[in-house]
Image: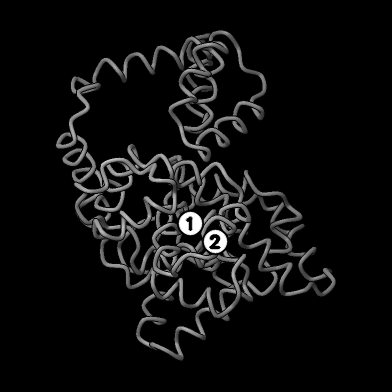
């Protein structure tokens, strides 16, 4: 096989995040640092981890990735226009009206929300300390703006009763009015620019509440859902219908499952599969080599009992990996709420 073909094959096997990491390495420290300045904490961490994990990257591979990037940019005739209307049309066309709404709000609203964006660089305990004494409605707005995994960490810092109230408010949040944003401005040292002219936004909602609960510990998840059910059974059922749980990984296609399994350690998988649905186990076994599948089955049969909290923690770690791969476009997760994808 010609050398060029070998390079193209090697590049094609890289995930989207890995290609980004190769591109950043090729740009050099100065220009890579300039690009990272415009990214959020989650993106910086993911790219950094991808860069650290790269091995056997040749000069030819870097050149191929950079050429692909240049070719892609050259096809984007509207790149750099900075038009809100262009962004709205592009995302609506790509994601559909319902799913695009929240993404659009986060992009167009978030670029001026210095205070909220600053929170994304803080750990969960620090954020909780900042907003702990605020009204639960304000807390729900802040958590709706954060990424679900970060919001889940913040939620875990609050007492049981407060958690339930916050999640219910997130689930029933139907847009944010200028008055609420003004109050949020005051909390965040009035760093949220243009609040007086901001229209209501689509942060929050059933799906946001479900996404956050997907990341909290199993005991907290159960307590919150039971408390919500006591207050509003229909709301609790709606939230649960939209949650993506470990057994939902059985809906991932074969190629996606193989990609996911490459990112998960065997010990982590062994622990997570305790008590998993048979269809998910079969899905995983069918996407492994025969020898690996037999070894995993034997290990499952011989394994000592494990604490439920440890099993749930392993499952949530794997779900976190799955969401990271989905965000990078490497796999597609089928949501529990119908035909949407997360």
Callout 1: 10 Å neighbours few (<14), some, many (20+)?
A: many
Question: In the displayed structure, does residue 139 sit left or right of residue 103?
Answer: right
Q: Nearer the viewer, residue 321 or 33?
A: 33
Q: Residue 148, labelled with which disc?
A: 1
Q: Is residue 1 visible?
A: no
Is the C-beta separation of discs 1 and 2 under 8 Å?
yes
Q: Nearer the viewer, residue 70 or 57?
A: 70
Q: Residue at x 19, y 19 (%)?
A: 77
Residue on which the image places disc 2? 152
Q: Residue 215, labelled with which disc?
A: none
Above or below, comparing residue 37 to residue 71 in the picture: below
Above or below, comparing residue 5 to residue 272 in the picture: above
Q: Residue at x 33, y 38 (%)?
A: 112
Disc 1 from disc 2: Cα separation: 6 Å
Above or below, comparing residue 331 to residue 9 in the picture: below
Residue 236 percent coordinates (x, y): 41, 81
Residue 247 percent coordinates (x, y): 54, 68
Question: Residue 277, located in which quarter of the rendered image?
Answer: bottom right
Question: In the displayed structure, does residue 217 sit left or right of residue 139?
Answer: right
Colour pattern: one colour
Callout 2: 10 Å neighbours few (<14), some, many (20+)?
A: many
* Quadrant where the image shows the C terminus: bottom left
Give SS at disc 2. Answer: helix
Residue 338 percent coordinates (x, y): 32, 68
Residue 12 percent coordinates (x, y): 47, 26
């Amino acid at each position: 096989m010609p050398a060029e073909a070998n390079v193209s094959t090697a590049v094609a096997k890289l995930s989207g995040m890995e290609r980004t990491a190769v591109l950043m390495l090729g740009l050099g420290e100065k220009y890579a640092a300039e690009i990272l300045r415009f990214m959020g904490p989650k993106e910086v961490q993911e790219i950094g981890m991808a860069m650290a994990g790269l091995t056997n990257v040749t000069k030819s591979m870097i050149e191929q990735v950079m050429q692909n990037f240049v070719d892609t940019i050259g096809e984007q005739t509207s790149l750099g226009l900075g038009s809100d209307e262009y962004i709205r049309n592009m995302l609506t066309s790509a994601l559909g009206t319902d799913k695009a709404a929240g993404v659009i709000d986060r992009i167009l609203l978030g670029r001026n929300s210095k205070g909220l964006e600053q929170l994304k660089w803080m750990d969960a305990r620090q954020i909780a300390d900042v907003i702990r004494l605020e009204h639960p409605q304000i807390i729900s707005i802040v958590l709706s703006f954060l990424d679900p995994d970060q919001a889940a960490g913040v939620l875990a810092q609050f007492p049981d009763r407060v958690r339930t109230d916050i999640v219910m408010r997130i689930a029933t949040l139907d847009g944010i009015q200028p008055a609420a944003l003004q109050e949020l401005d005051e909390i965040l040292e009035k760093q949220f620019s243009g609040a007086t002219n901001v229209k209501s936004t689509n942060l929050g909602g059933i799906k946001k509440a479900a996404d956050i609960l997907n990341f909290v510990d199993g005991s907290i998840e159960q307590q919150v859902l039971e408390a919500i059910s006591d207050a509003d059974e229909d709301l609790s059922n709606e939230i649960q219908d939209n949650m993506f749980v470990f057994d939902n990984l059985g809906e991932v296609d074969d190629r996606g499952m193989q990609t996911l399994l490459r990112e998960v350690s065997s010990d982590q998988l062994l622990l997570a599969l305790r008590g998993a649905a048979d269809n998910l186990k079969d899905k995983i076994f069918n996407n492994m080599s025969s020898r690996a599948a037999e070894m995993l089955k034997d290990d499952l049969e011989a394994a000592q009992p494990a604490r439920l909290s440890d099993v749930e923690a392993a499952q949530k770690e794997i779900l976190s990996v799955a969401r990271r791969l989905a965000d990078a476009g490497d796999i597609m997760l089928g949501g529990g709420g119908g035909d949407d994808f997360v």
